[in-house]
Structure formats: structure tokens, C-alpha cells
């Protein structure tokens, strides 16, 4: 079966590929439906009739139609171009293999002898390149898998470390909560001590004021005591002066009394 764009598919590939939603040609990606495809070959009954007729006419078999061979060769060239684009990275490898598979399935044994052998060798060469590319991709995939396993091992190790760090963090958070509670208790104690210190400071200020008043009173008492001491000293001096004066007066009085008791003209000596 051939598409409107001239690319050939076998019946199975055409039925599978163009029965999907929004189908397109795997070679040129033009929109194509299964209903619009062109059947290139006869049914089995018609084919058997044509073969029988050929044997009877002595033709020795049915030759391929030039149009059919050209369409197949064109499909082969498109498959080669698709494979080359896939090798260059500009086309999906699955689409390239699908185009190549479509070309291979479209070639029947009676048409194989009429296909350009260079085209077939080119397709085989391109498929070999694709196979080598796939092998390289498999090697890369193996390396990627190895790297992925190593990365998963590292991830598991990192996850284990993260879990340990999480446990440590949880423990640290619990310790932080306990420390915060202790800090709250200490803050309450500090506030209580601060209040007590404030009260003590106020008491100290009051005591300081009282001490200042007492010191002033003491100084006043000291000044007053000094004043009274000076007055006492003066009084003492006056006392002793008066005492001396009194003693002298007494002595003078006694002297006068003795002189008055001695008779006049007496020769007696006065013993003092």
C-alpha cells in the first residue's frame, strides 16, 4: 500500500501505523489516513489467477511493474535519508527503523531482483551504522546505569546522612526548647532578683538619706559638743580662778583673824 506522498507500506504496517489518531507518514511526516492509501498489489485470488494466466501463456512469471519498482526504490531512498538523519541526530531512531521496516516489508521476492542493489547495500550499510550507534548507545546506557547506581548509592548515603542530621537536628531542637525553658525560668528568677535589687536599692537610698541626716546630726552634735566643751573649759578656768581667789580671800581672812587675836605689845612670836 502506498501513501498519497508516494511512500510504500505493507498492509500490516499501514494498518498499525495509520489507524492511530492524527496519523502521518513515517518518512516525510505528511498527514495520511488509512482510507486514502492506494493498494499497489492484487488480492490473493486475483494474484493466483494472474499467475495461472501467465503460466498458460508461457510468460514464465509476472514481472514487476516499473511504477511499483520506482515507488519501492523511492521508499528505500527515503528510508536511507531518514536513517542518515537519525544517525546525525535530527530524526528519531524509531521513526527511521519504522521507515526501513516499511521498505523491507514492501519488497516481495518477485520484485527483489528488480530493486537497485546499490540501494540495498546502502540501506544495509546505514542499518549497520544504526546498529553500531545502538551498540554505542547501549554502552552509554550501561555507563549511565552504572552512574545511576552510583548516584543512587550516593543518594541513599546522603539520605542516611540527612536522616542522621534530621535526628541530630530534632535532638538539637529539643535541647533548644529545654534551654529556652531554662532561660525562661532564669529570666523569671532574674526578674525577681531585679525587683529585689530595686527594692534593696530603694532601701539603700533611704538608709543613705537617713545616714546623711544622721551624719548631719552627728556633725551638729559634734559642733554643739565642741561649743559646750569650750564653754566647759572656760567655766573650768573661771572656776579655778574663782577658787584661787576664794583661797586667797580665805587666806587673807585667816591672816587678819590671827593678827587680831595677838595682843598689842606682846613679845610672843606668831607661828605661822
Image (cartoon, rainbow, N blue to C red):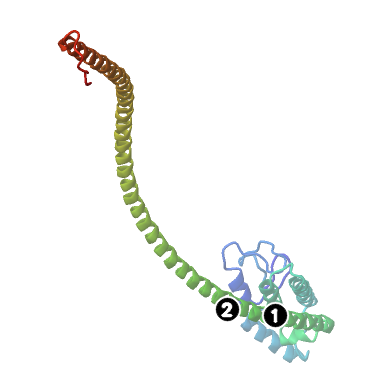
Q: In the figure, is residue 254 to the left or right of 204?
A: left
Residue named by callout 1: 134
Left or right: residue 196 versus residue 95 is left
Of the pair 172 and 160, the residue shown nearer to us: 172
In the image, residue 202 above or below residue 222: below
* Quadrant of the image containing the C terminus: top left
The answer to whether any part of residue 73 appears in the image is yes
Q: Quadrant of the N terminus?
A: bottom right
Residue 149's disc is 2
Query: In this view of the protein, which residue sits in the foreground, 86 or 270?
Result: 270
How far from the left and from the top, in percent, is residue 172? Answer: 42, 62
Q: Give the SS element for disc 1.
A: helix
Secondary element at tag 2: helix
Residue 105 visible somewhere in the drawing: no
Query: Between residues 135 and 145, which one lies in front from this camera angle?
Result: 145
229 left or right, relative to 14: left
Q: Position of residue 206 (x, y in %)?
A: 30, 30
Toward which corner of the image does residue 226 lie, by quadrant? top left
Residue mark closest to the camera, 1 vs 2:
2
Q: Position of residue 131 (x, y in %)?
A: 72, 82
Instruction: Give whichever of 184, 156 is nearer the camera.
Output: 184
Give the left or right position of residue 121, taking residue 40 as reference. Answer: right
Q: Quadrant of residue 71?
A: bottom right
Q: What distance separates the C-alpha of mark 1 from that of mark 2? A: 22 Å
Q: What mark, if any, has residue 204 been given in the picture?
A: none
Check the image and report above or below for 86 versus 203.
below
Query: Going by the picture, which residue comes out furthest to the top?
Result: 264
Residue 213 vertical placement versus 112 (above, below): above
- Tell me where residue 247 appears, x and y as whole percent: 23, 17
Amino acid at each position: 500500500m502506498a501513501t498519497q506522498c508516494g511512500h510504500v507500506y505493507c498492509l500490516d504496517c499501514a494498518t498499525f501505523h495509520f489507524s492511530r489518531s492524527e496519523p502521518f507518514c513515517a518518512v516525510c511526516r505528511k498527514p495520511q489516513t488509512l482510507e486514502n492509501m492506494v493498494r499497489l498489489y492484487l488480492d490473493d485470488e486475483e494474484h493466483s489467477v494472474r499467475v495461472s494466466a501467465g503460466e498458460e501463456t508461457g510468460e514464465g512469471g509476472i514481472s514487476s511493474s516499473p511504477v511499483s519498482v520506482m515507488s519501492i526504490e523511492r521508499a528505500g531512498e527515503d528510508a536511507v535519508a531518514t536513517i542518515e538523519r537519525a544517525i546525525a541526530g535530527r530524526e528519531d531512531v524509531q521513526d527511521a527503523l519504522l521507515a526501513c521496516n516499511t521498505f523491507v516489508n514492501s519488497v516481495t521476492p518477485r520484485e527483489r531482483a528488480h530493486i537497485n542493489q546499490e540501494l540495498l547495500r546502502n540501506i544495509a550499510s546505514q542499518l549497520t551504522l544504526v546498529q553500531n550507534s545502538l551498540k554505542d548507545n547501549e554502552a552509554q546506557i550501561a555507563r549511565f546505569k552504572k552512574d545511576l547506581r552510583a548516584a543512587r548509592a550516593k543518594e541513599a548515603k546522603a539520605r542516611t546522612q540527612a536522616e542522621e542530621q534530621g535526628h541530630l537536628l530534632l535532638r538539637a531542637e529539643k535541647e533548644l526548647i529545654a534551654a529556652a525553658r531554662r532561660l525562661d525560668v532564669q529570666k523569671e528568677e532574674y526578674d525577681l532578683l531585679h525587683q529585689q535589687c530595686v527594692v534593696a536599692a530603694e532601701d539603700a537610698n533611704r538608709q543613705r538619706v537617713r545616714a546623711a541626716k544622721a551624719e548631719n546630726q552627728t556633725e551638729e552634735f559634734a559642733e554643739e559638743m565642741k561649743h559646750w566643751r569650750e564653754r566647759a573649759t572656760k567655766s573650768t578656768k573661771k572656776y579655778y580662778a574663782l577658787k584661787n581667789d576664794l583661797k586667797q580671800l580665805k587666806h587673807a581672812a585667816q591672816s587678819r583673824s590671827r593678827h587680831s587675836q595677838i595682843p598689842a605689845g606682846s613679845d610672843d612670836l606668831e607661828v605661822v
